[in-house]
Amino acid sequence: MKMGQTYPAPAWDLPHRHGGRLPRQDCSLSAFRNTTVPSTLTPRSMDLRPCRTMGSMFRSEEVALVQLFLPTAAAYTCVSQLGELGLVEFRDLNASVSAFQRRFVMDVRRCEELEKTFTFLQEEVWRAGLALSPPEGALPAPPPRDLLRIQEETDRLAQELRDVRGNQQTLRAQLHQLQLHEAVLGQGHCPPLVATDTDRSSERTPLLQDPRGPHQDLRVNFVAGAVEPHKAAALERLLWRACRGFLIASFRETEQPLQDPVTGEPATWMTFLISYWGEQIGQKILKITNCFHCHVFPFEEQEEARHAALQQLQQQSHELLEVLGETERFLSQVLGRVQRLLPPWQVQIHKMKAVYLALNQCSVSATHKCLIAEAWCAARDLPTLQQALQDSSSEAGVSAVVHRIPCRDMPPTLVRTNRFTASFQGIVDAYGVGRYQEVNPAPYTIVTFPFLFAVMFGDVGHGLLMFLFALAMVLAENRPAVKTAQNEIWRTFFGGRYLLLLMGLFSVYTGFIYNECFSRATVIFRSGWNVSAMVDQSGWSDEFLAQHPLLTLDPNVSGVFRGPYPFGIDPVWSLAVNHLSFLNSFKMKMSVILGVTHMAFGVVLGVFNHLHFRQPYRLLLETLPELVFLLGLFGYLVFLVFYKWLCYTSASAASAPSILIHFINMFLFSRSPTNRPLFTGQEMVQSALVVLALAMVPVLLLGTPLFLFRQHRRRSRKRPTGRQLDEDQTGLLDASNPSEAAWGSDEEKAGCPGPEEEAEFVPSEVVMHQAIHTIEFCLGCISNTASYLRLWALSLAHAQLSEVLWAMVMRTGLRMGNKIGVMAVVLVPIFAAFAVLTVAILLVMEGLSAFLHALRLHWVEFQNKFYSGTGYKLSPFSFAVEE
């Protein structure tokens, strides 16, 4: 972020006594009909045309503050229409009023209560495994009179759904009890018999004697029921310990799982039959089974009685299933109505709530017959806004009025984008939203960002894969399945599809310059080096070739070097052992040239900000010193690179001086005896450039503060002492000429400051901020130039990774196939591994690294030369849902 500059606060021509806002007046409907309202406020005579046509992407659009006079009867309709158009951003005129004390708070609460009911209905639909389809077509906000009808129908549907769902749960619980009872009676538990005499007891002696025997007064009781399987072992153990063995328990698992009445999932149960004697033992058993939440059922001793009870239970279950089926069919009908009515109701109530929230931001006139709203609106949309309000308020008898008013607050930033420019504008906005009408870096980022990325990612093969991937997303962008995908990674790639498209395309271009395709050189044109000419004229013998494994091509030998390669790097360099040294020198100089050019372009863009905000003094006191400092030092370095390229040939390359040593001696005001100058008078030129660059530092440091201080003293002397005009009247009538009150600042202030702003001028603060800016720029020129060397480093890293991957995977596979003789079989897994590693390492990881470095170069090295990024976006009141 750019620091170190102070500017006068933004100013519009506005009466000072009202703090930047028009005085409250009687804005009732009757006041519109009276002659006391100026004719300039009537819709027929009001001029809503923008004072000048502002650009689109190159600078944010002109945004005006308008005052809306909405008749109370048509206020809801007007705001609803504005929500459909999405033209204005309302300002809260009731910021000091609590949310519970605003006029339409009851309507907002009713909408919130309806939304709670909608949530219940939606959950019930999802619980039934159904889906809610989005409503077809655009649904307007319903009129306020329809709110009661929607609320009644919603409450009736919700009540029906609660009743039917409750009946269904009750019937399912009853059916579950009957099924458990059937399982207990049908499990085959045989009641045990009690022994007649302990002395004559044996294993074959029945536990129960015939009732007609001598111990007919001893009665055995039974407890039967069902328990969850995970509780069965604990229940059996506790029963045995608590009853001291005076019982016989039998546990069995149900043959078929039963449906759970709550979750609807199948679950198994454990049935048990406990025989005991003694009244106290029975009470203990009942208490223990209740603690374990067991289902206890009556159990008859006689087989015939149990069989009859089982038949009765089966009949009851059959009847209950029929009733449950009818209940579920009626539930399906209710859910069908909910599916049909709920989606449009949700959209309509959501819009209605948004309208009432916007109306709560409006103030009420003294007669309570008119609502007054203030909103930001693009100047080019003002005629559309006026027409929409007139159409919406035509039924009320009095048309709504739009009045453009001046304001001291900084307007919001509006930059219209489309599918192509949205991703590039997002890169700029991630750094910071631009201030109102300052130069927008996004149009230049469309070219510079993919290009700088491609410099670090230059490879024809890798760039082509990225380009095809992005092209597939671009061609499928209108498919609903692609748009509605919820995967976060996919949505990130899809949102930047056009950015990826250009990044891949530029990577193919730089790949042709580097002559690299998956790290392999391609021979498109004939090489500029002729090996046969070197062999013919050098007299290489067999003995010489045997003793010298490395041969050098001398460009000074006639016919060896036939001229430069038509485009990019000559493919013969891929066979040379000094290939890396050659690319190091080339890419390092290229990085410095691109970096200095990029930064100088950023400084030049600041000129448009100074001219637009009517601050020509900054051209001489800031822009000119910055350009002289930057180009006098690092621009001279770029000049030395080009001069050495153009003036030294292969014949004189051995005696060519070092640019780096000359650049170091330039700051030390010294010379090196072994490093001869590039041109005559070089030392004098270098000394003059250093002195001139150092002389620009005090100009940059003190120029702007001294000028502002002198301007402040001049205005203080010329400040009028006589009577002032009636600002309440002139502020309202002069608001139609916004060109006189233009926003005039780079960061904080512009144009014609008023008396209040002049009193706030503090020279020490101005000097301090300007000193920070000077130090940041001067030191940044050095660090930022070095930062652009990342283009060289990442380009070499990408090329070397590609070379290593090819050598360790594909080259090994090709050699293995030649030895074994089964190349077709070996190359399939080898190529698969090469493809996977290429995508994972070189495309994803290296691509992300190059993307982040290109992002840093734009944010830190480029945008801080002219872009403050301290504004805020225009967020219009709109019903539209962003994709």
Image (cartoon, grey):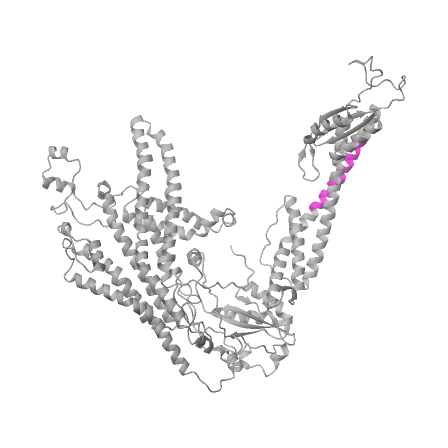
Q: Main secondary structure of the magenta part?
A: helix
Residue 678 placed where, x, y %? Answer: 16, 57
Residue 20 placed where, x, y %? Answer: 51, 74
Location of residue 279 (image quadrant) = top right
Residue 362 placed where, x, y %? Answer: 60, 69
Question: Does residue 584 appear left or right of residue 482 in this picture?
Answer: left
- Residue drawn at (23%, 64%), measured in percent from left and top? 689
Q: In the image shown, does 6 or 473 lie closer to the viewer? A: 6
Question: Does residue 261 appear left or right of residue 639 in this picture?
Answer: right
Residue 738 placed where, x, y %? Answer: 46, 75
Residue 330 located within the stretch drawn in magenta: yes
The magenta segment is: 312-332
Q: Is residue 742 above or below residue 784?
A: below
Q: Is residue 32 above or below residue 94?
A: below
In this orientation, does residue 295 appear? no
Location of residue 827 (image quadrant) = top left
